[in-house]
Amino acid sequence: MSGAHSAKLVHSEIMHIRLVIERLSVSDLDRSGLPRAYWRKRLQSVMQNHQLSPAQFDEIDRILGTLNE
């Protein structure tokens, strides 16, 4: 995968997860078919499979913090 395509994919994935987490309350996430553990696993996959910028790591940390509340 080219660098530009990979960067775009990572950005899209992080933004998608962030938007879902922002729109659903913690209790909604827990009741949904996609609980917090699912979203944490997706974020961990992004971190393990892509080269991230410091800003992307920061964004993932913020999302993980929200999921842990």
Image (tube, rainbow, N blue to C red):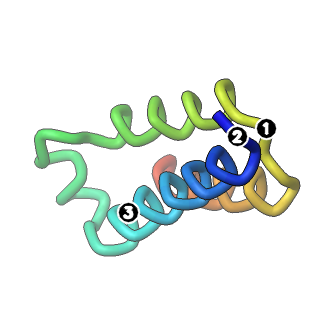
Q: Label 1 crowding class (10 Å Cα cut-off): few <14, some 14-19, many 20+?
A: some
Q: Residue at x 54, y 56 (%)?
A: 14
Please give left or right for residue 30 compared with residue 5 in the image.
Answer: left
Tell me the element at label 1.
Answer: loop
Q: Residue at x 30, y 74 (%)?
A: 23
First along the sequence among labels 1 and 2: 2
Between discs 3 and 2, the one toward the N terminus:
2
Mark 1: amino acid: Gln
Q: Is residue 7 left or right of residue 12?
A: right
* Disc 2 element: loop
C-alpha distance separating marks 1 and 3: 23 Å
Picture layout, residue 23 above or below residue 46: below
Q: Which residue is mark 1?
A: 51
Q: Position of residue 26 (x, y in %)?
A: 30, 58
Is the N terminus in the top left, top right, bottom left or bottom right quadrant? top right
Disc 3: which residue: 21
Q: Nearer the viewer, residue 28 or 8?
A: 8
* Residue 37: assigned label: none
Q: Earlier in the sequence, mark 1 or mark 3?
A: 3
Q: Determine the residue positioned at 70% across, 40% down.
A: 2
Q: Is residue 35 above or below residue 16?
A: above
